Image (cartoon, helix red, strand yellow):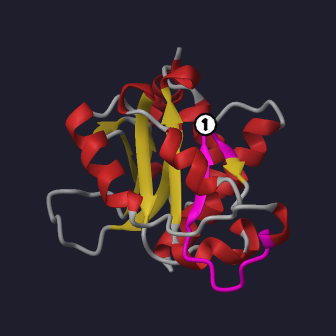
Amino acid sequence: MKIQTSITLLLLVFTQIANGQKLDQKTIDQKLDLQNKENVLYVVNGVPCERSELDSVLNTYSDELLVELMKVKNLGDFPHMTSKEVVLILFAYQQKKKEIRKTLRNLKTKFPDKYPNASQAILLDSKNPVLYIDNQQIHHTEAKEKFDELKVADIYYIDFKNEPQNPEHYGPNAKNGLVRIWTKNLTE
C-alpha cells in the first residue's frame, strides 16, 4: 500500500511538472499532506536537508529525474530523531555499469511476451511489467523489443517495482510491476 501511495504521489508530481511547475517544498508538503511542517525531516538522495534549504537543493536536480517521493513516520525507532515525519526524495543518479548490467539481466526474464503483429495487441494474461523510458510509457506491444534494444552504456538509472502497481494509473499490466529507465539522453 505504501508503494502504491508513493507511485500515486509521483503521478501527481509528474502532472505538475508537465504543467510547467517546479517541484518545491510547498508542493511536497501539500502532496504528502504533512501535518506538522516544522517537525519534518527531508532526505534528498540519502542526505538530510534542512527545511530552509530544501528549495535550493531541489533546484540542483531536474524534476524529470524524480524517482520517488514518499512520507514515512518515525515511530520511535530512532529516538535521537525529533522529527515525527520523514520525507524521502529520490532522484535518478548515474548508477554503476555493474549494477545496471545486473539489473538488466534480472529484468530480461520479466519481459516474456512477444507481439509479432498488431492483431495480438491484446493479451489478457500478459506477463510484461509496465515500461517507462525517459518518463514516456512504452506501449506493451513494444515493451520487450524496446527493453532488448537498451545498452548498458546508454542507461543512467533503472528503477524496478516488482510488486503490483495501481492499474488505474498504469493499466492492466501494472499487476506485473513497473520498470522505469532513465537514459543518458535525458540527462545530457
Q: Residue at x 60, y 32 (%)?
A: 63
Can residue 39 be seen by looking at this rendering? no
Query: Was residue 129 drawn as part of the magenta stretch in this picture?
Result: yes
From the top left corner, tell me how far across and down residue 66 is, in percent: 54, 40
Left or right, 35 with reference to 135: left
Which residue is nearer to you in this view: 108 or 164?
A: 108
Q: Which residues are magenta?
A: 120-136
Which residue is nearer to you in this view: 70 or 62?
A: 62
From the top left corner, tell me how far across and down residue 131 is, in percent: 59, 55
Q: Residue at x 26, y 58 (%)?
A: 82
Can residue 178 be seen by looking at this rendering? yes
Vertical placement of residue 152 versus 111, above or below: above
The residue under label 1 is 134
Local secondary structure at mark 1: loop
Looking at the rendered structure, the kind of residue marked 1 is Asp
Left or right, 152 with reference to 81: right
**For residue 48, which quarter of the picture?**
top left
Q: Residue at x 73, y 56 (%)?
A: 139
Left or right, 66 with reference to 156: right
Q: Which residue in the rendered view is the most extreme toward the front?
A: 116
**For residue 158, which quarter of the picture?**
top left
